[in-house]
Image: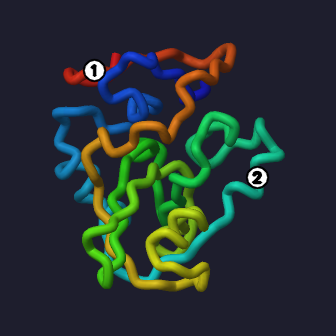
Amino acid sequence: MKKIIRVAAAATLATLALLPGALAAGSAYAGAAAERAHLKGDRPISSHNYRAMADLPNYSVFCDIPISMMDLTRITAVQGLDTDECGTILKVTNPLKPDAPQYVMAVDRGGAGLDLNSDSFRELFGTNENFQRASWEPADPSHGKGIIHEDVELPGFRQWTCDTSGCH
């Protein structure tokens, strides 16, 4: 069974409603998921060019989300990611520029701590040179708005809607 869903455009927290493991508004996003060490860290991270996969629209990442459904500039792989953590929004911060974090969605498994999309990596560090030090932690799901393309409809995928009470 696929875990991909389409989110209603009118949903308050539309982008995070994508996966059963996604954290909804009002949930303890700083609680259970944050307890998992790999969703919070402070160490050098690597980059990955997910946009190079744009020519493979049916290619899916670890969380079973087709490439064509996502803003590939705002996704990341997480070392040791579990399926129930798919869709978690992470705040990634360069310690030298703490006021300019990047918010990305955990959709893939791999990397050294994180394997951040190269666009977000470049925004964060001003370079594509791998293994720059960053800290990351789960963030409020509202920071994920726009990561999943709401106008993409894939037959056979469960459709969810999200509002301030959670995802249904």
Q: Is mark 1 on a helix, strand or loop?
A: strand
Q: Name the residue under label 2.
A: 53
Q: The C terminus lies in which quarter of the figure? A: top left
Q: The N terminus lies in which quarter of the figure? A: top right
Label at residue 108: none
> Residue 110, image x and y in percent?
57, 65
Please name the amino acid that badge 2 sits on.
Met
Going 63% across and 23% down the picture, which residue do you hit? 152
> Residue 37, image x and y in percent?
31, 66
Residue 138 found in image quarter:
bottom left
Mark 1 or mark 2: whose residue is earlier in sequence: 2
Going 36% across and 65% down the picture, which residue do you hit? 92
Residue 117's place in the image compared with 94, above or below, is above
- The front one of 82 and 92 is 92
> Residue 124, image x and y in percent?
44, 72
Q: How crowded is mark 1: few (under 14 residues within 10 Å), some or many (20 or more)?
A: some
Is disc 1 in contact with disc 2, using a CB cutoff of under 8 Å? Answer: no
Q: Which colour scheme is used?
A: rainbow
Label at residue 163: 1
Q: Is mark 2 on a helix, strand or loop?
A: helix
> Residue 86, image x and y in percent?
45, 44
Q: How crowded is mark 2: few (under 14 residues within 10 Å), some or many (20 or more)?
A: some
Residue 68 found in image quarter:
top right
Residue 165's place in the image compared with 124, above or below, is above
- The front one of 61 and 84 is 61
Going 30% across and 81% down the picture, which residue do you hit? 95
